[in-house]
Image (cartoon, coloured by chain):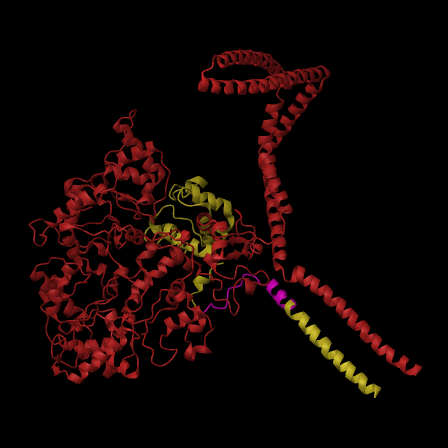
Chain colours: A yellow, B red
Amino acid sequence: MQTRNNIIRITLFAAISGVIISGCSKPQSKNAKSGAHTAAADSSAAAGAEQELPFNLREGKRLYNHYCAICHGETGDGAGQYYGFGLSPSPARFTDKAFMKTLSDETMFKAISEGSAGVGKSNMCPPWGKTFEKDEIDCIITHIRTLTGN
Amino acid sequence: MANENKNKAPYRAYLFVFLSISLLALSAWVIWNDEFGLRPWKMYQKEFKSLKHDNLEKDYQKALKDFQKSGDAARLAELQQKLKQAQDHFKKKEVHDRYLQLSARINDLKTGIAENQKTMQTIRGQFLETEYYFTKNQKPEDKAKMDELQKQIDAIDKKIKDLKTRLTPLQTEQLGLMGDIPAIEAKIEALQKPLAEKKERIANNNSAPVEIRQRLIGDANKADRCESCHAGIEDSKNVSSKQPYTRHPLSFVYLGNHDPSKFGCTFCHRGQGRATTTIEKAHGNIRYWEEPLLKRGMTQTSCLNCHGDIKNLRGAEHIHQSTELIRKYGCYSCHKIPGYESMGDVGPELTHVGMKVNYSWVLNWLMDPKNYSSMARMPKFFFTKEQAEAVADYLFSMSGTTRHDVDYASVTPDEKLVEQGKILWSQARCNLCHVTGGRGGNHIKMYAPELSKVGSKVNKAWLFNWIKHPNQYYAGARMPQFTFNDQEISALVEYLISTYTDDEAELQYTTPKTISAGSIKKGKDLIQQYGCYGCHKIEGMEMVQVAPSLRAQGVTFLKSDEMREKIGTELTSIGSKPVEMLDFGKMKKEISQDRLSYLKQKLRDPRSFRLGLRMPDFRLAEKEINELAGVLYGFTDAHVPTRFLVPSKAEIDKMANVPPYQFTGDFAKVIKSVKCINCHSIKGIGEDYAPDLTFAGSKLQEKWMRSFLANPDVIRPLLQQMPNLGLKTSTVTGKITMPRFNLNKKIVEDTNKSDVDVVVNYFQQELLSPDIPKNIPTIPDMSMEEQIASGKNLYDQKGCVVCHQIGASGGAVGPNLSNVGNRLNPGFIFVHLENPRRFKPDIVEPTYGFTERERIVLTNYLMTLKLNNSDANKK
């Protein structure tokens, strides 16, 4: 009789503690999951992957294609479709990884805002500092960095 | 008995201990959870502070290094030494004692002055009071008192002046004792200032409290706590590129124009602003929150909530591009969409289509438009052959009684005419709008029909009349009138019909067949069912009607005044439609149950939800689906406070009872026939493919205008910036210029005036700008030759040649400047050089920031670039 009671007690005790433990861990695990959440692309990446790019990249691409691609080319190979191939010296090649490694962000910023003449090269690329805000030049630099294929 | 008790006790004891410990643990957990578990923002803010600290620290170290490198550190040390010397000198006994002595005396004097001033105030008060009574009562005793008080005031005044005179030299001497100390201290502070500021920023960051940050917009009942986790949003420098530590992209546009303390975050980004416990809750990605966070690529949809005009709105470029799809596919023809109420018909009028096309062509077209042309915008209605025949029968019955085809394949074309037509075709530059054989169609937004198979579609008689008088076929025709003579038109017709045929076309009705009445009735019913009259004007079908077959099924309008204007659902607030009201039907398990997925699925496959749906399939690309869904998602009935609204110009004009701009007089007739606004824009009406002519009268010279209109040549080798040309889809040889409309041979209808005269007159009288001066300022101390030479020098130095051509050299990005002295008015060049974006916001030309002097010399130089008369027509 005592053993039976003990068994009942133990079972009851296990059940209750099980409930308590499961009740405790649920919210904790949710927080742990959300704590580890980083800026991953969301699951609606069916197609239109371009729209999943961060805004800075999309804006940089738009600005680059509108203002720079004529001479530098949409892919950055320095052969803008109509005019880039005829220029001498030819525009900078953004696809060249080794060359791009030598350029710091500060140098690129200076080259864009003061023109190529501002970094000691020819005067072919005009100064854009009065056309763009700092944020816009940063977006363009971000986009150019992706042209090496990163 | 005692044994039993002893045996029971241990079990209870263990149970008791276990339960006590669990209770303790639970309590501890509850406290921890409340402080930290449910407040993840504390962790994010702390992490952000540490990241920012690292960043600021690095910045400070760099500034320190630069400071030391640049010699400023040396200068600082020098100054500090000088300061010490001065201070030592000052500390010397005699200097210090004298200083204290002077201080005491100055203090006494100042006290004396203050006391006297106080007495003066009292006496002055008495004086004013006495003066008042004297003015009132004119009693002589008051006058006497006034005089005496005045005497006292004068005496005190003198005393004060005397004290002040004694004070000044003492103060000067005291200052002299201090020597250079104030000056040196100021210089030291200036040198140390940048570093001190950086240090202060570090200290501020360290002492910043970790707390909930909230933007409260009371009247909209919003409390946005997003910045509790996104702590760096308003920072001027990016501390990290990992979320949630980033700063707001393009903040000068978005935050600069929308102060977060006035707008909050959720008006634009949606989400559940009040939530702070988990990411899912804060972003609204939970079951009962109807406005989840707008994902990447969709944020600009919120611009539509407040802004009426998004055309040149900085920061809304992506969504503006997406709204072009509504125009392209003509969604507004079947659905009511805000802002698109007065758009023209997407498709041509069908009342007389029986006289235009082959019956077999219509069948083919109705069953799948893309069989005829891959560029067709008309969607697929999934008609069976019988249904297509019924519709075609109805349409043909409006202008005849038979199904008929004309077969030109068996007719030998007149080769000479074909040859002439080909030349005319290329001279008139029809390929600008029309695609033939994979070439042309650069003016994409014109959506002109592809003509690669037009020989199997239309009959010659109709084509002849169409080219001669497009407006006669239907009122909304966009094709301009080129004023060829009849012989030229015959040549063009021969060329088109014989060259651009469809070899695979099967023409079954070269022997006409009578149309049956039953078929006509069935066709009419189908047209009413599927709403063809939304995109195409059909006589007799201007109003929405319920098709008889549907009425038989019980479909009806509830009340006569609820007759919807369009056959499709109104889309004014589709972006706010509750998810429960969306009919997912068969797709319930296939797609996720939220509004955006519904919209995308509807655009992808409109009839997939259940049987009996009538929206046709537009065969949109996935990218187009995403863009359109984003736009539709932005059509909400969001309760935006009125102070946020920026109505469009059209809305403002409507509110002010200003009628929309309309062309007047003979110019209106020219516009109606030549349709300049297909490519050009004038006062906001028209397209932006060709230059804007709103200020053409102030911008262009008259003589040049006349010669250009008569014989348009190449000004801009790359008409638009490269990506917009769509060059990957077609090859263009030769440069893009305005078509030759044979103006100058025309007489405007009902008048005796030449159309070029009408146009030039209108430009010079109506299309002017007060901001373009007639004359530019002069430089008195430079001769004209010097100015021109200086201008040329500046032109070379700044590298204008990279984009502009003069003669044989130069780039092809901007307009050719060889003849600009004949083309543009100097006032325009002068104003343009200051800010090229002023008249064309998306111009590629950079803003150089020229001084006025530089602009004057440049303008004078450019005005010398003229081609003599014989060459003027070539360039």
Please determine whether, in this image, residue B69 is positioned above or below residue B650.
above
Q: Is residue B461 left or right of residue B832?
A: left
Residue A22 figure quarter:
bottom right
Report which quarter residue B382 is drawn in.
bottom left
Task: Judge from the rendering whether residue B211 lies leftward or rightward of residue B873; answer left or right.
Answer: right
Q: Can residue A81 be seen here?
A: no
| B201 vs A95, nearest the viewer | B201
Number of marks in the image? Answer: 0
The quarter of the image holding the N terminus of chain B is bottom right
List x then y, in percent, for residue B396: 15, 76
Asked whether the viewer can see residue B606, the reply is yes
Residue B495: x and y in percent read 14, 66
Magenta part of the protein: which range?
A28-46
Q: Is residue A43 magenta?
A: yes
Relative height, residue B120 to residue A125 (above, below):
above
Horizontal and vertical percent position of residue B165 = 57, 12
Q: Residue at x 58, y 55 (%)?
A: B228
Residue name at image x 63 percent, y 52 percent: B210
Q: Residue at x 37, y 50 (%)?
A: A67
Q: Quadrant of residue B428?
A: bottom left
Q: Nearer the viewer, residue B859 or B834?
A: B834
Q: Nearer the viewer, residue A129 or B238?
A: B238
Q: Position of residue B211 (x, y in %)?
A: 61, 53
